[in-house]
Amino acid sequence: MFKLFKAEYYKLPKSSVFTLIILSVIIAEIIATGLFFYNIKFSNTTPTVNIYLIYCISWFTPVFYLLFGVLTSYILSTEYENNMWSVLLVSDQNKVRVVFNKYIVALILSIVIIIVFAIVHMIFSMLIVGHLPNLISYLYILVSFLIGSLAMQSIQFFLGLAIPNRVYIIGVSLVISILYILVQSYWIPFKIPEHLINSKNILNTNRITMFDVGFIIYSIYSLLVFLFINALTCLYTKRKDF
């Protein structure tokens, strides 16, 4: 299994991927900062570390979904485009194991994206607000975001496996990102991170409440979707003729 993981890892154009992640996160931070200053000037928004963090998380989330879709499309569609599935499976490799390793690589990349955001945001927070976020609260928000994003990660990976065309996968991810910005809902999976973190309450009170009822409910919701979609992915992989 480790050999399969290494093979998937070495297929990635690492410098291009890392550059794409950094640029995308910086662009999200710049947009969030512009909106932050706009609301400070034209509304009663308070320029605090916590509120600035929520503004940045809100714009980072759609960028995260789009990035994850782009990277997933590369990980999965490469095999379709080069007719490599038959080569991968000709050595009696288990189909589920091959796909599982691809998902592990995608999951690691999602963690890398969040870490890059964490570093970039600390720099911006120091420059814009003049303070760093409280470390414990910051880690709580980042871990909560990761838990909340697991549902959509599993859905996007499944779609990437089911749709062999890279352009379509990226297109679907773009639609998800746009819908995240436009749609307000408590139960649509791509809104889970926002509700799990309880962004609205932080904007209203400037306080981060850890492990509240919302955290528990939306964590369970995200994990249930994650487990269900992964079970579906496993079943689909076993039945699919690559």
Image: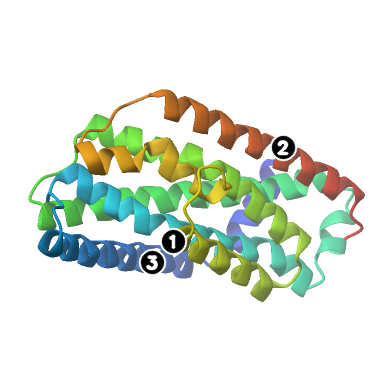
Instruction: Kindly state the secondary structure of the residue where label 1 is placed.
Output: helix
Residue in the picture at 27% in, 55% down: 120
- Camera-near label (2 vs 1) is 1
Residue flagged by tag 1: what amino acid is it? Answer: Ile
User: Around disc 3, counting alpha carbons within 10 Å, would you say few (fewer than 14), some (14 to 19), or many (20 or more)?
Assistant: some
Disc 2 + disc 1, Cβ < 8 Å? no
Residue 24 numbered mark, or none: 3
Q: Is residue 132 left or right of residue 116?
A: left
How much space separates mark 2 and mark 3, taking CA atoms?
30 Å
Instruction: Kindly state the secondary structure of the residue where label 2 is placed.
Output: helix
Residue flagged by tag 2: what amino acid is it? Answer: Phe
- Camera-near label (2 vs 3) is 2
Residue flagged by tag 3: what amino acid is it? Answer: Ser
Q: Is residue 198 left or right of residue 53?
A: right
Q: Is residue 53 left or right of residue 190?
A: left
Residue in the picture at 54% in, 58% down: 68
How much space separates mark 2 and mark 1, taking CA atoms?
26 Å
Question: In the rendered image, which quarter contains the N terminus?
Answer: top right
Query: x, y percentage for residue 140?
Result: 34, 32
* Residue at numbered disc 2: 228
Residue in the picture at 25% in, 67% down: 30
Query: x, y percentage for residue 216?
Result: 48, 25
**Residue 130 in the image: above or below residue 70:** above
User: Around disc 2, counting alpha carbons within 10 Å, would you say few (fewer than 14), some (14 to 19), or many (20 or more)?
Assistant: some
Residue 95 versus residue 229: which sits nearer the camera? 229
Earlier-in-chain disc, 1 versus 3? 3
Earlier-in-chain disc, 2 versus 3? 3
* Residue at numbered disc 1: 181
Residue 9 numbered mark, or none: none
User: Around disc 1, counting alpha carbons within 10 Å, would you say few (fewer than 14), some (14 to 19), or many (20 or more)?
Assistant: few
Disc 2 + disc 3, Cβ < 8 Å? no
Question: In the rendered image, which quarter contains the C terminus?
Answer: bottom right
